[in-house]
Image (spheres, rainbow, N blue to C red):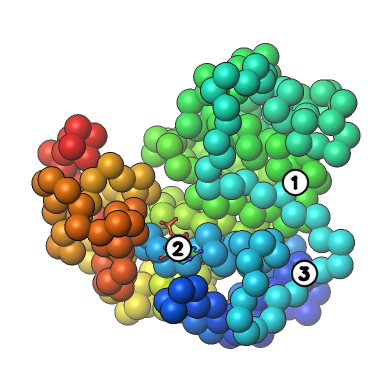
Amino acid sequence: MSDPIQNKNVELLASLDHINLSLQGKTILHDVSLQLQAGKILTVIGPNGAGKSTLIRILLGLETAQSGGVYRKPKLRIGYVPQKMAIDSLLPLTVERFVSLSSRSFSNTAKAKDALEETGVKHLAKQAIQQLSGGEFQRVLLARALLRKPELLILDEPAQGVDVTGQAELYEQIAALKNTYGFGVLMVSHDLHLVMQKTDQVLCLNQHICCSGQPDDVSKHPEYQRLFGNLPAEGLAVYTHHHNHCHELNGDVVVGECKHADHNHSHHEHTDIAIEKVTTKEQEKHTHG
Ligand SMILES: Nc1ncnc2c1ncn2[C@@H]1O[C@H](COP(=O)(O)OP(=O)(O)OP(=O)(O)O)[C@@H](O)[C@H]1O
């Protein structure tokens, strides 16, 4: 984001400054800048393979950019809700224990319960972590992140596996928690319409920053329109691809073997529209195909 901070009173928590990263000869991020401020929600949207998770990894210090600057406020406390987390199905682990284990004060289950209450899943405290639904698990991960008393909360697709009503509630809750605690939020999302309502700034990423700004402005931007626009809100389903199949470039599901080794990403290498209008029939194909 090239705009300078307008309000000097807003606390800068972290920033990326003209970040460039290539991996195995492929550009992953090109000249990406952003600023994260206390009390503000920045949402990064972009098609699969756009570099959203990589951008988070750079902010967290897990990946190093080839050029550009990364700033984190000294001793910045970051709460992180990952995109996915594998938990051993045989591990006897209650929700309460899972949350308290990840805290520095791991013996304090009272704090874990408070955090679970804040995210609306206290009633699940004694349940086995493996038995949770997708939406419940995301709320447990959110509770776990809150225990760190974050100044910056980073969420990588927090609403995956959550139905539309649940997604709206989750974004509502994140915004409410942000208002209560005043932390800054960086969120990666595919949920264009829902996310727009709760975010202060949107950054549309596709290796480079296609456009950024306030949600209303971004949604009218030609680059945003090219990537996500001209699709009616009604009947539009944007979903994360956890594939057991491949697509043709036109979006059709390939019957038979995938041509590419990495079929999770290969079909997203083109830079045009990478979201699909899913009709009931197509959804059925995805479910059963
Ligand atoms: N270690 C690596 N080596 C080579 N390429 C990589 C590596 N890690 C990630 N990539 C590639 O970088 C690109 C960006 O990946 P990233 O996970 O950041 O995208 P994303 O926007 O989060 O995608 P999604 O929405 O599918 O989660 C992808 O094309 C991915 O295949």
Q: Amino acid at mark 2?
A: Ile
Query: In front: mark 1 or mark 3?
Result: 3
Secondary structure state at the residue bearing disc 3: strand
Mark 2 near mark 3, Cβ–Cβ under 8 Å?
A: no
Q: Tell me whether the residue at label 1 lies in contact with that at label 2, contact meaning CB atoms closer than 8 angstroms.
A: no
Question: What residue type is disc 1 on?
Answer: Thr
Q: Position of residue 74 (x, y in %)?
A: 86, 67
- Left or right: 48 as drawn, with respect to 248: right
Q: Which numbered disc, 1 or 2, marks the residue closer to the eye?
A: 2
Q: In this view of the protein, can residue 211 be seen by the observer? A: no
**Element assignment for label 2:** strand
Q: Image point 19% across, 57% down: which residue?
A: 259
> Who's the residue at 51% across and 38% down the image?
169
Q: Residues within 10 Å of mark 2 (few under 14, many from 20)?
A: many
Q: Which residue is mark 3?
A: 72
Residue on which disc 2 sits: 45
Task: Assess disc 1: are there few (<14), some (14-19) or many (≥20) residues with their C-alpha within 10 Å of its C-alpha.
Answer: few
Residue 281's mark?
A: none
Residue at 16 percent of width and 43 percent of height: 282
Ligand 1 visible in quadrant: bottom left
Q: Position of residue 113 (x, y in %)?
A: 76, 24
Residue 27 in the image: above or below residue 44: below
Disc 1 versus disc 2: distance between alpha carbons?
A: 25 Å
User: Which residue matches tag 1?
Assistant: 180
Q: Badge 3 local density, few (<14 within 10 Å), some, or many (20+)?
A: some
Rounded to the nearest angstrom, the CA distance separating label 2 from label 3 is 22 Å
Residue 221 in sight in this render: yes
Relative vertical location of residue 233 with respect to residue 17 in this rendering, above or below:
above
Query: Looking at the image, which residue is at 75% across and 46% down?
Result: 180
Q: Position of residue 173 (x, y in %)?
A: 60, 41
